[in-house]
Amino acid sequence: MSFKQALCAATAMTLVTASGALAENLVIATVNNGDMIRMQGLTQDFTDKTGHTVEWVTLEENVLRQRVTTDIAAKGGSFDIMTIGMYETPIWGANGWLVSLDDLSADYDADDILPAMRAGLSHDGTLYAAPFYGESSMIMYRTDLMEQAGLEMPEAPTWQFIREAAAAMTDRDNDINGICLRGKAGWGEGGAFITVTANSFGARWFDEDWNAQFDQPEWADALNFFVGMMEESGPAGYATNGFNENLSLFQQGKCGMWIDATVAASFVTNPDDSTVADKVGFALAPNSEGVDKKANWLWAWALAVPAGTQKEAAAKEFIEWATSKDYIELVAENEGWANVPPGARTSLYENPNYQAVPFAQKTLDSILAADPNNPTVKPVPYVGVQFVAIPEFAGIATEVSQEFSAVYAGQQTVDEALAKAQALTNDAMEAAGYR
Amino acid sequence: MARAVTQQRKIINTTAAWGIGLLIFFPILWTVLTSFKTEATAIADPPVFLAFDWTLENYSAVMERSNYARFLWNSIIIAGGSTILGIIVAVPAAWSMAFVPSKRTKDILLWMLSTKMLPAVGVLYPIYLICIKLGILDSRGALVVILMLMNLPIIVWMLYTYFKEIPGEILEAARMDGATLKEEILYVLTPMAIPGIASTLLLNFILAWNEAFWTLNLTAANAAPLTAFIASYSSPEGLFFAKLSAASTMAIAPILILGWFSQKQLVSGLTFGAVK
């Protein structure tokens, strides 16, 4: 081998070694939903651009929450990137468990993130998680049934109209329920829904001194209204219905209206899965007459980097790729505009291609109508619309929602459930040192 | 006294047994059927039993998305490793309690069983921290040891029951012929207890295969077995029942086949000593 050849070989080996050293293998924990699975299918684009490879750990939402919480609290280091929600982000950010994302590149255009999402994923003004997709809740309704009932859905209806319309659309003989809503126990299931419903009746979880407010008339109004309407026009056994159960009912044409996550809009309008895909209209979530808060939540699945990871730079590169404008274009190119991750970036809603999607504007309007810093009519000491961003909330709200589900199942009265909710919440808050 | 069994009674008993058997098997059958449906058919109301367009698209989607072979291999190593390790530890323990009992043997057996009454989540955090400190988080080795420890009380109890059925005089005779303790256990006791050991192995392999709490909480990308594979297809926000059913079918198929082929040993081992 000549000296020149040896030199070339040495240079090549150095380059290979160097590129190998720079390329990282990222382990990402994520949830199983359509948008996340789509991202997994497009990961090669990220590898082609950066050389980094990705390993996915996909888990069911509740399993994932338990798994990543254990890992980050124990500093296990199992994951380089975690998919977390709007509930965990400010709490974990305050604990110093997450890496700040304020230093993402200028090309990333962090200012394009929808302000409500940015606020919900920040703590003390520092962004700790980048939204992959965001959602609110809105009304999805059958245009044909509404027409048959001789009614017209307003852009922003009241609960009183919804109840009237639900009764008019109900046709028990043909197995059509006027309205389908979540009643399943769990803070993220029925608990989330009844909380935003209560917000829209002027209720709140806590006063400024962290005293539970279930003994106030607004909670009784909200819960009595909900139970009354569901008994008149809801499906049998709604106490055990969550998102999936209602999605199934709506797709089979058994619901006149469904108020739930905005991401459901793409499911119910997909002709492959839905029998009513061409008969669905959208409207903003309702509020009670005279109350200036709507029953819509705000949520985001976001990507965050746990503090202490050895691969912070590569992890941030991935987050920039997955939550970028270019990624949205990539999904649109491969899967169509209706399937791009919604609710994260302002520019998406300015794109004429996306504006043509039937539920795009209502999704944006719903997201903009939710304010996590000012979620209720009366002042509150917490952040969060359908949750209270304190570590104790998940446990308390799960118990409270179990009491409410017992009402839906006919096992106790509204007054009994509210009294139990009041007592258990105050006890838990006292034990945690809030009161 | 022998009891005459009439033909009519036989028919009733057989029908009832088949009915109960089918009832128990129905969820598995339904899972398998759903795995061949489209997502829309999977949620159809009224449910469709057999008259649907059968498709393999769910299996193809699952195979495309997940590395099934890696999950399967991890399951085999974890379930197999923990079972074999458990037997190695439990045989001497059960021998000593069956043949050289002390006045505290019953208490020890009950204490061992009582450890199964502790909810696993109660020790999750300490075990998680130990795994981090030892650098064995997300490793198959850690799960082999933990699942072995979790199943050890059952293994010891089962072996103890089988060993108690073996006459102590045979072991005494072996000792008188000059057998050492090792020879006594290996060449005298073990061959006589093979049906019991085989059924213990099988049952614990099944328990370890299906164990979901530790295998989900202590693994990430490297050591995740088929339980994590199934969990990756469950979703509270989106209807993926057909794909979930395909993943479940793929996860239970190996153990179902193993159980089918070894059912004779399993049943004879489980009923060993039940009727004297």
Image: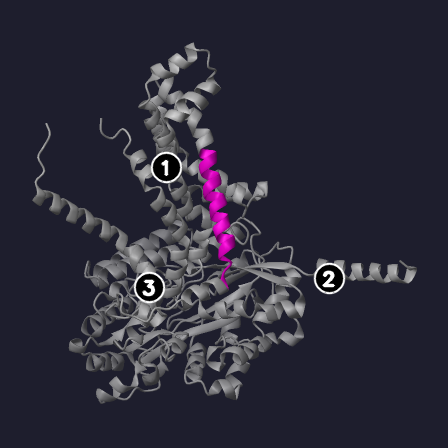
Q: Residue at x 33, y 27 (%)?
A: B162
Q: Is residue A203 visible?
A: no
Assess whether residue B73 is covered by the magenta stretch.
yes
Residue position marked by numbered label 2 in the rendering: A19
Residue B89 visible in rendering = yes
In the rendered structure, the residue with mark 2 lies on which chain? A
Label 2: few (<14), some or many (≥20) within 10 Å?
few
Residue identified by numbered label 1: B116
- Circle number at residue B261: none
- Which chain's residue wears label 1? B
Establish whether labels 3 and 1 are both on one chain: yes
Residue A165 in the image: above or below residue A184: below
Image coordinates for residue A205, horizontal then vertical, percent? 36, 63
Foreground mark, 2 or 1, reads 2
- Disc 3 element: helix
Q: Is residue A306 above or below residue B262?
A: below
Q: Label 3 neighbourhood size at 10 Å, few (<14), some (14-19), many (20+)?
A: many
Query: Relative to A153, is B93 on the left or the right?
Result: right
